[in-house]
Amino acid sequence: MSYLDNIRTFVRVYELGSMSAAGRDLRVSPAVTSSRISALEEHLNVRLFQRTTRSLTPTEQGRAFYTGSVAVLDAVDEAEGQVAGITDNPKGSLFISAPLGVGRRLIAPNVPDFGRDYPLIDVRMRLTDRKVDITTEGLDIAFFLGEPEDSNLRIRPIADCERVLVASPQYISKFGNPLDGQALIEDNHNCLNLRYPGAVEFKWPLQTEDGPKRFQVRGRYECDDGDVLTEWALAGHGIALKPVFEVAEHLKAGRLEPVACETPPAPIQMACLYTHRRRQDPKARLFMEYMTERVGAAVKDAQRGVQLPR
């Protein structure tokens, strides 16, 4: 094993706070992870972590070594990126994440084509509707909908996505079509909500005559998978707030209908996030350029022909 592998392993153990988590992230066994850390400690003749059966805590030397290690890895990554950038076939693995709906409908269908055009790049994709942390989860690129919370990350816009409040004809027949966001609350409509770790309350951003307003809605059902919310809405169990590209076919076929049309939802931005250290990585740059063109076109195609309330 190389000294650089040991340093990369140390950085992931430090960031994730766990030998096993770092091993999973690096796709090596816990035994390999532990041996790399031990080899690094033996080489440096210091203890990098205080270990107990329940915790792993960096020592003072470990904290100092982490700062230098990150700088070293950044320099190596940038150097590799500069070399790869002047070749026709960059290679290596890309770790990306995307929301479930975005990943299933827009990213995943284009991955094989990307792989055909760039056969030396491996794509490792994780789909989740929860918020992700690029740094601690070892991601190169994270696709997202909305506004990022971490201002230290770089953003590449992809498309402005129209959104719509939808319900099935069965639901509307039984419970009525609310005119606006206030009716959602006053008439006690069952609003289907996307729940992820850290979410405290549900406030839907709707456009009113007085400008944007957030309505604190309520509902009996919630899930961390946006596609489940769509299925519930199709089955007549409530009202869902959805990007149009996720429900366009259902709207065109009449399986779902817009509701609360006097206060439609505000559009939401789709973009991808990446860290400063990935700016010069040709693999990441190629993937973002590839997906930006194709995903942006797919969003526009899905929205075309859908009549939305204005």
Image (tube, grey):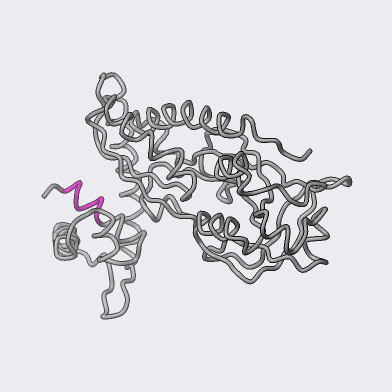
- Note whether 198 is above or below 264 in the view shown: below
Q: Residue 23: x, y in percent?
A: 23, 60
Give the residue at the far left of this rendering: 1
The image quarter in which residue 305 lies: top right
Give the residue at the far right of this rendering: 210
- Residue at 30 percent across and 49 percent down: it is 69
- Residue at 30 percent across and 67 percent down: it is 18
* Camera-side residue of 235 and 290: 235
Q: Residue 100: x, y in percent?
A: 46, 50
Q: Which residues are magenta?
A: 3-9
* Camera-side residue of 118 and 188: 188
- Note whether 195 is above or below 207 in the view shown: below
Tell me the chief SS of the magenta region: helix
- Residue at 49 percent across and 47 percent down: it is 101
- Residue at 14 percent across and 60 percent down: it is 32
Q: Residue 137: x, y in percent?
A: 38, 54
Left or right: 10, with 181 as reference point = left
